[in-house]
Image (cartoon, rainbow, N blue to C red):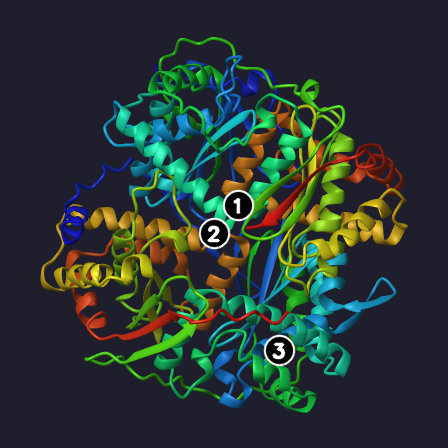
């Protein structure tokens, strides 16, 4: 069955934007997938994404680190019933194909010329909603995981730090493990990967996101797949896995570095989550951050973000490079200083700039689709910054921030002892 | 490897889903008080470009870096915002907007993006700084330090180095081929008086042009007009870009850098945007890049692909570069693969079904490299400056769709027969960047 039931109008879930922004349509697609469609004028390109709720370590009680990533790659690489592997279909359409795996979610994305959007959506849903896994596809996926691991170790010390920080903050569960790396002990078998894919990659466990040069009719191209239904996996609350005392860990990498991570508010505490987004932007934005400015002439790389997970979120700061240790005090001082309210004028300017960054961050189809997919998967689609821009709940939260509230939020969440990680240069 | 080329060329075309015409095109280019703009009614942000003919080609060899340094001085010039004096870039940020300065072969671009109200205010500040950059020692030192760091970064990019080598050879006798950030020695030694002279010669109302994208309206356009109205009147001296065409046998240029593997770039002349060969060259680029496709499941960044191509069409004459790291060029295999493909393309027309596939790839590349508000406003401005008014962005898409096998054969014969080779070899001992 290929028809789409558009429940949006009936449910009244069209979220109208402030200016002439077209509404985000929430649809119930054939097979039970949720569709989020947000047309966006501009370049004739479209983002086509599938988001699944699925732990990166698998659904069973025994963790299989990296199985979600492996399964997503293996499905894309295997010869599907439709003939051509999905990655090749996207490449032949002149597009770019990506897979991103987070502790509790899997994202499959394509950015394609607008004329190819429906075709790619049809193939993507056919491939993932009826996953075919071959031994060859699994072998190619294992090879890709191995290549990625080598690249990360050579070129992405910040990813090594992040994995270490999450391991130090959480005692178990998917958040404890790197979502990308396989266990050294035992690689998942084809049967393991098939079992995972069968449960994770169901239409009824998927959010289909379409942005850019699309309309609701584009979603008609989605196919239901096996159509066996079943309930969507719920957003995961992992607060129980937080360590009572976050740990300190040391890893090796291509350059020295260090990082901190704190547990933050759940996605449902929108104002506090937004406050920590604001803090990350104010201090650490790669171009305008107050700390970034202080480090401009030094050999350091700085990465910091508040990640709005379902419960809890995570605020992390990572510094890498030959002079990383020399700037530790600046980082500590800057975070400590945020426990006191900013003066009104500085706060007003910082908030205006933050609003601009938020809007700029969702101004392209792929970024907007990522944004919708993330917030929907973490359980609060309407809070997505891209949902309604000026008229949305996220921007309302931004405007509700005050210097006092930001300071109190920092004191509450970043005043605790963080998990720490140190990177020793090889 | 050559078998792979043939295989790639012979693969069947993928049947296309019927296109929805409106979605397959850019928003039409509209004139707002004679300023070309791609208007997005649903956007929250406006992007405005101010182009000044103060780009790389205005520099002599003794001024290699002046274009970028004057741009950075403007960005660091103190202005008053809400009663406080601060550098222009910070003042624009405090309004909730962003300033980007980009040095191109023929122009320098000042791009302001933000909500329309913020852009209007930011353009007012930009106009003040453009008209009276602060060449004092304090501001100049800040600008030099900022630029020097970017020069160090650029020098660590093998593609940036290869590209500068080939463009310097191609645009010989003109600054258009210099590295965008310039020479570190000249930047360090640049004095206020000499920089002021560069500014006075090139920052003129007469040479300025505007372009926009996003949520643009007449207020934004007027604010941009007011900004350039503060510049001195008159026109910069006219310039005609000279080139030295690649030769057969090819010239070879070699340099050493801190790279793990050798890098090679091959530079060609290329058709200008707006010429009848432009769309066919975009298809040729897609064909060459498809040779660099790997078996990776997900798309890889250009730096990780074995063969890449760059088509610089924001300058006339344009240029085309094929480049790669040593993993494929270290042995002659990669080179052979490229030349086998170009020989094949110039000797025999592609199958009609096959070219449809490469037209799709070329369309994809063009729309993805012209996707953001900044990209699109720069593209619209480029068309205006090259005298290509009307709906030129959509015309390009139409032209790509109409490229024939004969077009590809003609363009390959005409442009890819002669070339220059640039090689980066690893240094014997690594040099530490000076931060």
Q: Are marks 1 and 2 on the same chain?
A: no
- Sequence-wise, which precedes: disc 2 or disc 3? 3
Other residues around mark 3 within 10 Å, as few (<14) / some (14–19) / many (≥20):
many
Q: Chain of mark 2?
A: B
Residue with the mark numbered 3: B69
- Distance between the Cα atoms at labels 1 and 2? 7 Å
- Distance between the Cα atoms at labels 2 and 3? 28 Å
Q: Is residue B239 visible?
A: yes
Instruction: Assign a secondary structure to mark 3.
Output: helix
Q: Residue at x 36, y 81 (%)?
A: B169
Which quarter of the figure has residue B140?
A: bottom right
Nearer the viewer's eye, disc 3 or disc 1? 3
Residue with the mark numbered 2: B371
Q: Is residue A370 above or below residue B293?
A: above
Q: Is residue A305 left or right of residue B300?
A: right
Foreground pick, B347 / B301 = B301
Other residues around mark 2 within 10 Å, as few (<14) / some (14–19) / many (≥20):
many
Q: Are marks 1 and 2 in contact (CB under 8 Å)?
A: yes
Question: Quarter of the image containing the C terminus of chain B?
Answer: bottom right
Q: Are marks 3 and 1 in contact (CB under 8 Å)?
A: no
Q: Are marks 3 and 1 on the same chain?
A: no
The x, y position of residue A401, in whole percent, is 82, 39
Q: Is residue A244 above or below residue B312?
A: above
Q: Chain of mark 3?
A: B
The x, y position of residue B34, in whole percent, is 54, 67
Foreground pick, B407 / A77 = A77
Residue with the mark numbered 1: A364
Which quarter of the figure has residue A191?
A: top left
Instruction: Assign a secondary structure to mark 1.
Output: loop
- Distance between the Cα atoms at labels 3 and 1? 31 Å
Q: Residue at x 86, y 48 (%)?
A: A337
């Amino acid at each position: 069955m290929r028809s789409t039931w558009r429940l949006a109008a009936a449910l009244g879930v069209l979220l109208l934007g402030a200016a002439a922004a077209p509404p985000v349509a929430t649809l119930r697609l054939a097979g039970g997938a949720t569709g989020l469609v947000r047309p966006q004028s501009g370049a004739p390109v479209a983002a086509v994404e599938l988001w699944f709720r699925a732990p990166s370590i698998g659904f069973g009680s025994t963790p299989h680190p990296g199985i979600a990533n492996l399964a997503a790659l293996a499905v894309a690489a295997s010869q599907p019933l439709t003939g051509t592997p999905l990655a090749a279909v996207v490449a032949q359409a002149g597009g770019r194909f990506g897979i991103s795996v987070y502790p509790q979610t899997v994202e499959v994305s394509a950015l394609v010329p607008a004329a190819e959007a429906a075709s790619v959506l049809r193939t993507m849903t056919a491939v993932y909603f009826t996953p075919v896994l071959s031994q060859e596809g699994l072998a190619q996926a294992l090879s890709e995981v191995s290549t990625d691991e080598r690249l990360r170790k050579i070129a992405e010390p910040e990813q090594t730090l992040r994995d270490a920080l999450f391991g130090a903050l959480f005692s178990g569960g998917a958040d404890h493990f790197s979502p990308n790396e396989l266990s050294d002990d035992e690689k998942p078998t084809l049967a393991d990967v098939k079992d995972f894919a069968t449960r994770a990659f169901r239409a009824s466990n998927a959010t289909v996101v379409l942005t850019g040069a699309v309309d609701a009719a584009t979603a008609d191209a989605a196919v239901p797949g096996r159509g066996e239904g079943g309930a969507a996996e719920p957003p995961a609350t992992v607060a129980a896995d937080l360590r009572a005392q976050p740990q300190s860990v040391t890893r090796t990498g291509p350059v020295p570095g260090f990082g901190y991570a704190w547990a933050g508010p759940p996605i449902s505490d929108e104002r506090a989550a937004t406050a920590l987004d604001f803090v990350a932007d104010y201090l650490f934005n790669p171009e305008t951050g107050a700390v970034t400015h202080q480090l401009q002439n030094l050999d350091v790389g700085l990465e910091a973000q508040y990640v709005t997970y379902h419960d809890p979120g995570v605020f992390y700061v990572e510094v890498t490079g030959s002079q990383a240790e020399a700037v530790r005090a600046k980082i500590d001082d800057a975070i400590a200083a945020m426990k006191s309210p900013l003066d009104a004028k500085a706060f007003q300017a910082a908030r205006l700039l933050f609003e601009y960054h938020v809007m700029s961050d969702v101004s392209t189809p792929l970024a907007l689709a990522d944004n919708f997919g993330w917030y929907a998967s973490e359980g609060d689609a309407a809070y997505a910054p891209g949902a309604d821009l000026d008229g949305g709940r996220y921007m309302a939260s931004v405007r509700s921030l005050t210097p006092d509230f930001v300071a109190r939020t920092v004191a509450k969440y970043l005043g605790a002892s963080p998990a720490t990680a140190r990177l020793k240069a090889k | 490897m050559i078998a792979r080329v043939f295989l790639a060329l012979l693969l069947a075309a993928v049947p296309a889903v019927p296109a929805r015409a409106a979605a397959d095109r850019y928003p039409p280019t509209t004139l707002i008080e004679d300023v070309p703009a791609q208007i997005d009614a649903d956007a929250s942000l406006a992007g405005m470009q101010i182009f000044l003919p103060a780009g790389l080609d205005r520099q002599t060899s003794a001024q290699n870096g002046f274009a970028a340094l004057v741009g950075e001085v403007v960005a660091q010039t103190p202005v008053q915002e809400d009663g406080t004096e601060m550098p222009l870039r910070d003042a624009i940020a405090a309004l909730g907007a962003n300033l980007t300065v980009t040095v191109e072969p023929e122009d320098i671009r000042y791009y302001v993006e933000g909500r329309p109200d913020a852009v209007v205010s930011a353009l007012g500040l930009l106009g003040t700084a453009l008209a009276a950059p602060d060449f004092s020692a304090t501001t100049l030192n800040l600008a030099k330090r900022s630029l020097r760091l970017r020069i160090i970064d650029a020098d660590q990019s093998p593609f940036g180095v290869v590209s500068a080598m080939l463009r310097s050879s191609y645009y010989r006798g003109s600054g258009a081929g210099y590295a965008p950030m310039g020479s570190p020695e000249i930047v360090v030694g640049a004095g206020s008086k000499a920089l002021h002279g560069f500014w006075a010669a090139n920052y003129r109302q007469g040479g300025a042009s505007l372009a926009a994208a996003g949520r643009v309206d007449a207020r934004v356009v007027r604010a941009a007009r007011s900004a350039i109205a503060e510049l001195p009147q008159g026109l910069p001296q006219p310039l005609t870009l000279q080139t030295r065409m690649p030769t057969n046998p090819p010239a070879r240029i070699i340099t050493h850098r801190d790279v793990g593997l050798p890098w090679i770039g091959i530079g060609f002349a290329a058709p200008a945007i707006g010429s009848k060969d432009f769309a066919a060259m975009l298809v040729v680029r897609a064909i060459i890049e498809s040779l660099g496709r790997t078996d990776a499941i997900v798309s890889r960044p250009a730096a990780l692909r074995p063969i890449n191509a760059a088509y610089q069409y924001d300058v006339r004459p344009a240029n085309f570069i094929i480049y790669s790291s040593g993993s494929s060029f270290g042995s002659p295999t990669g080179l052979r693969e490229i030349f086998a493909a170009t020989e094949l393309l110039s000797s025999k027309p592609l199958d009609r079904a096959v070219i449809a596939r490469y037209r799709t790839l070329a369309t994809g590349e063009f729309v993805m490299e012209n996707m953001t508000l900044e990209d699109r406003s720069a593209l619209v401005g480029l068309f205006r400056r090259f005298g290509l008014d009307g709906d030129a962005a959509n015309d390009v898409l139409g032209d790509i769709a109409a490229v024939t096998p004969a077009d590809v054969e003609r363009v390959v014969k005409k442009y890819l027969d002669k070339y220059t080779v640039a090689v980066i070899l690893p240094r014997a001992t690594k040099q530490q960047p000076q931060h």
